[in-house]
């Protein structure tokens, strides 16, 4: 099963939120069978960090390593921690009982008739899971015979116990019902009825398999990613914080500093940012913060290990984007030339013309007297093509993790559009957007007047999530401030709005900014921008599954690039249609 970087980051965000502490390193994350971050379990993992001594729990957890029934012990450990942590949180966070019941319903449905695994320990764990979540739903009576009620009672640890007591309780339970022995224990292992010779090879095989376990392995309740066993290299693979604690990011100031060191120095001072947040971070985007940057770092930031590392990764990605462009530079230049010609021809045909006095052109009889009396040779009328200054274009690039495998392609597409517009004398501004830890980050590559900075677009790199609706709202707000008569916003997106910061509903509850909620919010912001007189187009960079979403958001005003040699024709046709309607 493949788990995307976005889902890994979403899991980390859920854990940080549950822990109410952004300085922790999430060494264990939980995903469902489809590779999605599990909302309930990752929230529980975060709450475990909040209420218990994680280092002690981790040391105890590591005693399961390379044991014959390792995954069974790990699963039971987390059932115990889920129960005691829930008891501590249920009155503090009213949403927890609801999330727990919903998870229990799904879990029981998936467990129906599936108590048979290859080993008896695994079978007993599944039965315990079944009994545990039956109890969650108030179905304590009539549990199936396969459920070991005594084991279930012992593993459902009370929330009244502290860390040491919880560890002792779990260890005692595992020693009573299984062959687990904590380090230093003198308690004898129960005798087995299995042939000792067969048991020797079985245990050797199981130990070998346990030793070869990767960081992501199946547990009774989902897939757990065990990062702490595999070192910091694995922990940092999704560009999550490995030095978060340095910034004491559980505070607003610490988190702000973390975002700054991750993405670069802010373009605006805090007074301006607060005003922008008050103006734009409303409705579906309440609780979201903003960070505007051009990716610049000062020397002090670069001395920081984390900022320096992020800068290095961004530089490496820019180099990769440039190298990918150079590999097909002839084709790219040809497409730029073709797109430039199509835009220019469309402007000649459809932009408003201007009639001016000139020393050449068609003679204007009414001006002849000026030549005779005033020695003014501008007695001719000349028609000038429409002034491109009447048109501005903003190019907005989705820089979320879902685009990670398309970074060179998206960077090249952004560059080709910007370069073609620049050659036509059309002012263009290019920036990307992504979301991380409650911040929507806007990264500026070039502004309208910076005609020689198109290659900055190759600095494009992806990370975090994407709050498309807020990004389009921000873009429309910035565009409104320019003086152009005609304004275009072109969004390069895969049509998958998804962010960890939830949407507040009118009833006071919360819902995920994903799926239908994210799509409808983005569609509403596109509609609002169009009502403000801004033409919004999309260059679609996603797959077939996202086509319905992008159609809902942008209607017919999007172009999908299937081949490089069709780029100019596809984007050119879209722009020609747009210019014709201005």
Image: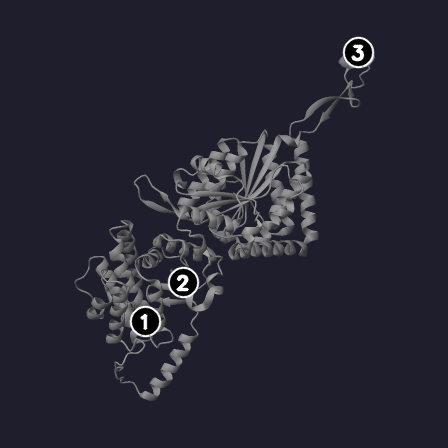
- Quarter of the image where one finds residue 89: bottom left
Mark with earlier residue (3, 1): 1
**Is 175 placed above or below 364 here?**
below
The label on residue 27 is: 2
Q: Which sits in the foreground, 275 or 499?
A: 275
Identify the residue under disc 3: 369
Whether residues under marks 2 and 3 lie with C-beta atoms below 8 angstroms apart, the answer is no
Q: Earlier in the sequence, mark 1 or mark 2?
A: 2
Residue 112 seen by the camera:
no
Where does residue 170 sit, x and y in percent of width and height? 26, 69
Front position in the image: 572 or 246: 246
Nearer to me, 398 or 354: 398
Instruction: State the image coordinates of residue 138 (x, y, percent, origin top left).
Output: 20, 57
Q: CA distance from mark 3 to mark 1?
A: 102 Å
Tell me if mark 2 has few (under 14), some (14-19) or many (20+) residues whose alpha carbon lies within 10 angstroms of its own. some
Mark in the foreground, 3 or 1:
1
Q: From what the image shows, is residue 245 above or below residue 353? A: below
Q: Secondary structure at mark 2?
A: loop
Q: Is 253 drawn above or below residue 582 in the view shown?
A: below
Which element is circle 1 on?
Answer: helix
Q: Residue at x 68, y 32 (%)?
A: 348
- Residue 525: percent from left, percent from top: 46, 38
- SS class, disc 3: helix
Q: Is residue 372 visible from the viewing direction of this image?
A: yes
As drawn, the label of residue 72 is 1
């Amino acid at each position: 099963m493949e788990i995307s970087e976005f889902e890994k980051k979403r899991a980390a965000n859920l854990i940080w939120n549950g822990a109410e502490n952004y300085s922790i390193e999430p060494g264990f994350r939980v995903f469902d069978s489809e590779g999605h971050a599990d909302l309930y379990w990752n929230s529980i993992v975060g709450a475990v960090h909040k209420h218990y001594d994680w280092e002690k729990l981790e040391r105890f957890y590591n005693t399961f390593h390379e044991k014959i029934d390792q995954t069974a012990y790990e699963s039971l450990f987390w059932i115990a921690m889920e129960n005691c942590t829930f008891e501590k949180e249920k009155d503090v966070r009213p949403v927890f009982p609801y999330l727990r019941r919903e998870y229990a319903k799904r879990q029981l449905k998936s467990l129906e008739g599936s108590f048979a695994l290859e080993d008896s320990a695994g079978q007993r764990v599944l039965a315990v899971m079944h009994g545990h979540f039956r109890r969650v739903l108030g179905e304590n009576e009539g549990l199936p015979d396969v459920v070991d009620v005594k084991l279930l009672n012992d593993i459902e640890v009370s929330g009244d116990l502290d860390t040491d007591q919880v560890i002792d309780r779990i260890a005692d339970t595992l020693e009573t019902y299984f062959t687990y022995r904590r380090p230093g224990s003198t308690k004898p292992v129960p005798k087995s009825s299995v042939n000792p010779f067969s048991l020797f090879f079985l245990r050797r095989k199981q130990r070998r398999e346990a030793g070869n376990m990767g960081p992501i392995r199946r547990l009774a309740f989902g897939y757990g990613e065990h990062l702490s066993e595999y070192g910091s290299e694995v922990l940092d693979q999704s560009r999550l914080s490995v030095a978060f604690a340095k910034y004491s990011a559980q505070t607003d100031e610490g988190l702000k500093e973390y975002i700054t060191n991750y993405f670069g120095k802010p373009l605006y001072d805090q007074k301006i940012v607060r005003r922008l947040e008050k103006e734009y971070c409303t409705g579906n985007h309440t609780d979201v913060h903003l960070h505007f940057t051009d990716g610049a770092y000062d020397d002090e930031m670069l001395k920081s290990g984390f900022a320096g590392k992020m800068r290095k990764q961004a530089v490496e990605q820019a180099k990769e984007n440039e190298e990918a462009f150079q590999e097909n530079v002839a084709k790219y230049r040809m497409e730029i030339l073709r797109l430039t010609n199509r835009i220019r021809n469309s402007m000649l045909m459809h932009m408003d013309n201007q009639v001016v006095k000139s020393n050449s052109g068609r003679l204007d009889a009414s001006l002849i007297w000026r030549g005779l009396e005033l020695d003014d040779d501008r007695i001719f009328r000349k028609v000038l093509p429409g002034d491109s200054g009447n048109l501005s274009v903003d190019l907005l690039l989705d820089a979320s993790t879902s685009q990670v495998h398309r970074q060179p392609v998206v960077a090249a597409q952004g560059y080709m559009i910007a370069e073609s517009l620049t050659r036509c004398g059309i002012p263009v501004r290019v920036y990307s957007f992504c979301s991380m830890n409650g911040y929507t980050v806007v990264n500026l590559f070039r502004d309208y007047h910076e005609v020689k900075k198109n290659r900055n677009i190759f600095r494009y790199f992806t990370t975090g999530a994407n709050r498309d609706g807020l990004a389009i709202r921000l873009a429309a707000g910035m565009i409104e401030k320019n003086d152009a008569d005609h304004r275009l916003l072109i969004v390069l997106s895969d049509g998958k709005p998804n962010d960890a910061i939830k949407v507040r509903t009118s009833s006071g509850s919360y819902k995920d900014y994903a799926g239908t909620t994210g799509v409808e919010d983005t569609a509403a912001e596109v509609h609002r921008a169009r009502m403000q007189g801004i033409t919004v187009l999309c260059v679609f960079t996603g797959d077939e599954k996202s086509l319905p979403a992008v159609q809902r958001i942008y209607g017919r005003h999007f172009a999908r690039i299937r081949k490089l040699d069709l780029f100019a024709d596809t984007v050119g046709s879209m722009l020609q249609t747009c210019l014709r309607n201005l």
